[in-house]
């Protein structure tokens, strides 16, 4: 009668079996060179940390502005700053003498709103811009170029043209029904100026000499008169 024989495994055999079991259950991947295999964990790409969210810079939303008017009136720039930060201010800066100079400033209020003004001090125009400023911890502010501060004055004018077409102009050329320009006694020929009347505005040049009737400073050509909606005589606004 046969008896079952039980053999007690040695410690070395048990250790060898554990190593084989570990190798059998570990996923393998193809080696980069020589076709070998390496554990998957050793070749897995590291997980990239999420990129930090970039801070949003403040930006202008200029809602209303009144940059031009008679000398002595007020130019107004208003709107709001998107992504405003507590402690920020808006500065109105005007170009003068080759430099930007601060004309007014306002603290950014509720919902980023601001309003800055400046007196129109002289005839002609000046470049203007808005700048956001704040504490050192605030992200760099934005700059927005806005409508130029443009000063006008009143001048008494008349017009001329019919019956004179084809005649020579003092500044060169001949007068035609389509000539845009003005006559003036002393402004240099070719001087650029802006004329306004009501809601209309015309850019013109000095093309002739005159008028020679007392109390009148400018003579408008017929084409300039038509564009302005001007009558026979009266006041216009001019920036020279």
Image (spheres, grey):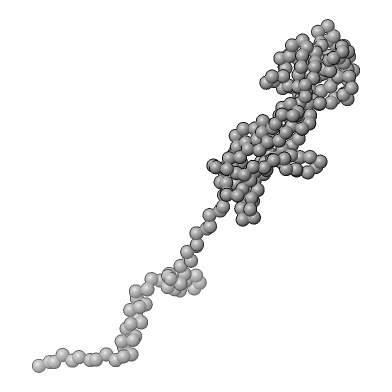
Residue 234 image position (x, y, % from top left) = 77, 14
On screen, 175 above or below 110? above
Looking at the image, the residue that sits furthest to the front is 72
Residue shown at 81% from the left, 23% from the top: 205
Residue shown at 74% from the left, 32% from the top: 120
Q: Quadrant of the N terminus?
A: bottom left
Lateral position of residue 185 relative to residue 73, left or right = right
Residue 117 image position (x, y, % from top left) = 68, 36
Does residue 37 appear anywhere in the picture?
Answer: no
Residue shown at 80% from the left, 13% from the top: 158
For residue 213, what is the image quadrant? Answer: top right
Residue 30 image position (x, y, % from top left) = 44, 69
Does residue 184 appear anywhere in the picture?
Answer: yes
Q: Quadrant of the C terminus?
A: top right
Residue 201 image position (x, y, % from top left) = 72, 22
Numbered circles on residues, count: 0
Front position in the image: 153 or 124:
153
Looking at the image, the residue that sits furthest to the left is 1
For residue 225, what is the image quadrant? Answer: top right
Looking at the image, the residue that sits furthest to the top is 163
Front position in the image: 171 or 146:
146
Residue shown at 74% from the left, 29% from the top: 72
On screen, 72 above or below 116? above
Lateral position of residue 26 relative to residue 36, left or right = left
């Amino acid at each position: 009668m046969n008896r079952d024989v039980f053999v007690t495994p040695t410690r070395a055999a048990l250790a060898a079996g554990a190593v084989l079991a570990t190798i059998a259950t570990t996923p393998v991947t193809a080696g980069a060179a020589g076709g070998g295999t390496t554990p998957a964990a050793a070749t897995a790409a590291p997980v990239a940390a999420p990129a930090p969210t970039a801070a949003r810079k403040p930006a202008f939303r200029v809602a209303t502005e009144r940059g031009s008017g008679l000398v002595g009136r007020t130019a107004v720039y208003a709107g709001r700053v998107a992504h405003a930060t507590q402690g920020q201010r808006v500065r109105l800066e005007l170009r003068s003498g080759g430099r930007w100079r601060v004309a007014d400033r306002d603290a950014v209020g509720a919902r980023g709103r601001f309003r800055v003004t400046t007196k129109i001090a002289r005839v002609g125009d000046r470049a203007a811009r808005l700048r956001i400023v704040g504490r050192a911890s605030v992200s760099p502010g934005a700059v927005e170029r806005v409508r130029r501060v443009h000063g006008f004055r009143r001048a008494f004018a008349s017009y001329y043209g019919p019956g004179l077409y084809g005649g020579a102009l003092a500044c060169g050329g001949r007068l035609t029904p389509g000539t845009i320009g003005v006559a003036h006694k002393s402004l240099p020929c070719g001087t650029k100026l802006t004329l306004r009347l009501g809601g209309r505005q015309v850019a013109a040049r000095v093309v002739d000499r005159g008028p020679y009737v007392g109390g009148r400073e400018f003579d408008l050509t017929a084409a300039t008169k038509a564009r302005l909606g001007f009558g026979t005589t009266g006041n216009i606004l001019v920036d020279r």
